[in-house]
Amino acid sequence: MLPIKEILDADVVIAGGGIGGLMAAVAAARAGASTVVLEKAHTKRSGSGAGGNDHFACYIPEVHGDLATAREAILGSLVGGDQDRDVLDASLMRSREVVDMWHSWGINMKPRGDWLFEGHAFPGRPRAFLKYDGSNQKKVLTAQALRAGAVIVNHSPVLELLPVPGGMGGVLALDTSEEKPSFRIVRAKAVILATGNPCRLFVSANTPGLMFNIGVCPACTGESIAQFWRVGGALVGMDRGYRHAGPRYSSRCGKATWLGVYRYPDGSPIGPFTTVPSRETSDITGDIWNSSFSDLMVNGTGPAIMDCGGASEDDLKHMLWAMGCEGLTGFLAQMKQEGVDPGRHGVVFGQYEPHGIRGIEINPETGTNLPGVYAVGDHVGNFRTNIGGAAVFGLISGEQAASYAAGASPCQDVENSPWARERMAYYSTFAGRSSGATWQECNHAIQQILTDFAAPGPHKVRSASLLKSGLKFIGDMRRRVDAELCTPTAHELMRASETLAIMDMGEIMIRCALERKESRGNMQRSDYPFTNPMLNGQFIRIVNGENGPEISWRPIHR
Amino acid sequence: MPPVISPDKCLRCGLCADICPLEVFGCRPAKNEMPTVRYPDECWHCNVCALDCPAGAITLRHPISHMILHVDSPFLKNSGQGGPHAAD
Ligand SMILES: Cc1cc2nc3c(=O)[nH]c(=O)nc-3n(C[C@H](O)[C@H](O)[C@H](O)COP(=O)(O)OP(=O)(O)OC[C@H]3O[C@@H](n4cnc5c(N)ncnc54)[C@H](O)[C@@H]3O)c2cc1C
Ligand code: SF4
Ligand code: SF4
């Protein structure tokens, strides 16, 4: 068995020090809870917000008037309409407070002097994405969490949740600060899950074989979703899968910062929304006809080109500045090295592999079906506004978890629970082998199976025959992984844990896709080629019950 | 090899290894040692190591597989402002 390097005690433990996790840490610590953040990498520069972001979904009353204006603008954008309205509203109601907080801490929410709403918008319609400069956001949030009194442990990815009867006892984590792996236990009364957007489930669409060339942070594989599921947590929308788009072949999210027009190679616009570059709206065709980038390749009229030609000098300067705020400094350097000038060149855009399959079900206070467990950020299943939502619900979850912990009793020896011992033995087996399968083999294997047998569209179908075959092959691969996986270093054990989470999520995805006996959006069933109106406005919910997975439908809260 | 460290400039402070979101440099190196790129395939090309390096010792090399596909602006081409390749 690998050694336990350290046991820490806390009221609240937070898995993941990204945007949501750090805001949770500030709020929990300010509310008086002893708070520990466990972060896989380093909170100053980890996650999808590592280098910055530049659009913050929010409701600013003096700009929007009533809440419905901001809400409708968000629901019409890339984050889409399938979310619980009560949860969305709860986040928007406190978004102004968080925007003011960030600004007072030194994250510039008014880099142009006043409120500026840009991108992800229809011409002439209200906008809900505040332009800001997030380039220093992770450093500022880290400093605020420390100032509030939270303890941050970097290089310590969470491996499992450790429940106790009637509540939570803490988490099991890995220590990767040294070459040799060891465990870290945090005993805590409440847990906040914040490990970000699930990715690396499908073969990279830009560079098959290169798993880390993807739009979002490849260290975020939705581990909390799998860990929460293993101990009975409820998930929603897990059959879905969103396919973002962006530059080909250098994968990076942030497409709304590009102010050009999506065009066919002959110069005609792909969509009807804009014919000239616009920094106010960007071309929302990319949000609402999301499959266009693939459709044009399949029908031979492509490739789709992001064309900023014709933009004014001033607008181009603005875009390049915004790309810096957005964390695209690597991409900017690459354009320079490769002689790409967005004022003169059109950049080919393509759809990326699916990511962000939905995840943990939360209520408007970020609570889950498990007492003492809260979840925020990109791995939430029934709500999403990216950075804005992660930040606001981070704050709310910290307050809620601190108040829950104040009334809960501590767990003395959660490290000796049968579940903790079982899981420590499980991970130790991989670390103890001297030869065998690498985590890369396993990650490629699950990506291949999911891409062939369960991928959402466009231009992909699912069917009972394919999905059931996929489930069987995951079972076959799981037996081999358990028998052969070998992780000599802490780093490799960390990547293996991500891969195991991906396998669990792939299996859950297939089970939910089997339940959807209809075609809807990018989820096309060849054996049920129609949309069933009875299923309009419904989420598939899945829980790992005592007798195996329990699947049900529930209405999306309107 | 995505991040390239200049041995002449590197101060051996270990910061890049500490803050890389993908832990491409593995664990923090021993004192006075230069970090090595342990896991180049795991680089996300996010550039934060280069941004934060106090000595400006890191440059990112973008692999050929990641090249940015680009063409002359179709709009400029159509409006006769297409630059050197406009007639292609
Ligand atoms: C280039 C780019 C541009 C973007 N632009 C925008 C934008 O302008 N507007 C917008 O709204 N959104 C944008 N996004 C998305 C935005 O960054 C995310 O929505 C946001 O960061 C989500 O916050 P989060 O807390 O859920 O996850 P993250 O901020 O990604 O944080 C997750 C954290 O969990 C850590 N972690 C993962 N697994 C574990 C584990 N097992 N144990 C411990 N820690 C773990 C990770 O290292 C990471 O620090 C962009 C994303 C990218 C990549
Ligand atoms: S951050 Fe720069 S100076 Fe410090 S170890 Fe890395 S390369 Fe060297
Ligand atoms: S570019 Fe980003 S992922 Fe690559 S080594 Fe530097 S910090 Fe790490």
Image: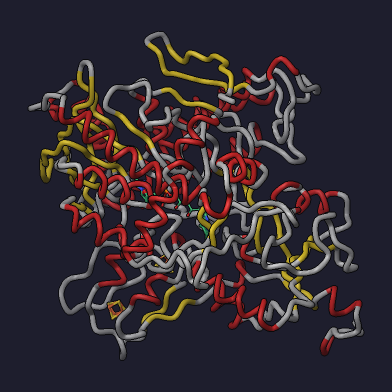
The residue nearer to you, when weighing A133 against A332, is A133
The residue shown at (75%, 81%) is A344
> Can you give x and y, in whole percent of width and height, for residue A517 in the image?
70, 17
Which quadrant, please, contains the C terminus of chain A?
top right
> Can you give x and y, in whole percent of width and height, for residue A254 in the image?
58, 60
Vertically, is B53 above or below A503? below
The residue shown at (73%, 21%) is A518
Q: Along the horizontal axis of the image, is A377 left or right of A296?
A: left
Residue A395 can be seen, yes or no: yes
The residue shown at (59%, 45%) is A70
Residue A438 can be seen, yes or no: no
Q: Along the horizontal axis of the image, is A449 left or right of B2?
A: right
The residue shown at (20%, 42%) is A31
Which quadrant, please, contains the N terminus of chain A?
top left
Q: Along the horizontal axis of the image, is A195 left or right of A262?
A: left
Q: Along the horizontal axis of the image, is A363 left or right of A528?
A: left
Vertically, is A512 above or below A202? above
> Can you give x and y, in whole percent of width and height, for residue A358 in the image?
53, 34
